[in-house]
Amino acid sequence: MMELLNYPVTTGIIAINILIFALVNLKKLDIEQLGSSYMTTIQNKQVYRVVTSAFTQREVMHLVCNMYSLYNIGCAMEHILYSGLYALCYGLIMIAGGLLSARIHKKEAPFTYSIGASGVICGLLGIYMVIAFTVFGFSGLKSLVPTIVLLVAMTASKKIDSIGHFTGLLVGVLCGIVLVSVFRFG
């Protein structure tokens, strides 16, 4: 746990998620105040919901899985990109991926609330995949196969916003492509 001190952005994000989780479960905050849907975020122009939804988890397992995943991929990405660039990428994935997800939900589920950090986590995974492929080729992606299989399997659950996962992943891959074209990795 002491190593979290070396990753201030990841540590801060985890702390905010835990705080909001506690406030939601103590009934001080409501999912309907924080969640993002097409109707609330885009139709009602409440774009702040893209940010609040990305820091909101309702159930303990939702929080534990997301924070464990964020700890793993977040610390790795903060180490690779350094704190400032990592925070910028995190914010870009959160906002662009969240808005794209809300927009795609317009037709099928305009009132369904989306919450959780997993869309941004998928975006971080997308950046990691691009960098790993750039540095090591296809062999750099072999270690990610179990994670990718798990991500695809999770999308079968009706409780999971698979669109949010894939829009986050897409934005992350695009960020990764920009990063490898600007910076030298490896």
Image (tube, grey):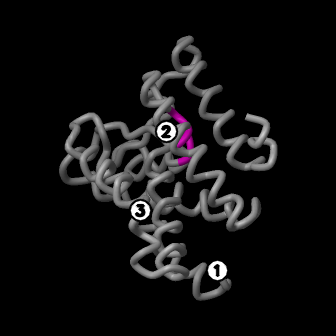
Q: Quadrant of the C terminus?
A: bottom right
Q: How far is disc 2 from disc 3 in space, using C-alphas?
A: 15 Å
Lower sequence index among marks 1 and 2: 2
Query: In the image, is 154 to the left or to the right of 12?
Result: left
Image location (x, y in percent) of residue 50? 50, 48
Give SS at disc 3. Answer: helix
Q: Which mark is residue 169?
A: 3
Name the residue rendered at 60%, 19% in the picture.
23
78 over 26 or under it: above or below: below
Foreground disc of the pair 1, 2: 1
Q: Are marks 1 and 2 in contact (CB under 8 Å)?
A: no
Kind of residue at badge 3 = Leu
Kind of residue at badge 1 = Gly
Name the residue rendered at 48%, 60% in the picture.
125
Give SS at disc 2. Answer: helix
Q: How far is disc 1 from disc 2 in space, using C-alphas?
A: 28 Å
Query: In the image, is 138 to the left or to the right of 80?
Result: left
Please give the residue where the numbered disc 1 appears in the rendered image. Answer: 186
Please give the residue where the numbered disc 2 appears in the rendered image. Answer: 66
Residue closest to the eye, 161 or 61: 61
- Other residues around mark 3 within 10 Å, as few (<14) / some (14–19) / many (≥20): many
Name the residue rendered at 73%, 49% in the picture.
9
99 over 118 or under it: above or below: below
- Other residues around mark 2 within 10 Å, as few (<14) / some (14–19) / many (≥20): many
Q: Quadrant of the N terminus?
A: top right
Task: Report the magenta stretch's main SS.
Answer: helix
Q: Which mark is residue 21?
A: none
177 over 40 or under it: above or below: below
- Is residue 136 one of those drawn in magenta? no
Residue 100 visible in the shown view: yes
Q: How far is disc 3 from disc 1 in space, using C-alphas?
A: 22 Å
Q: Which residues are magenta?
A: 51-56
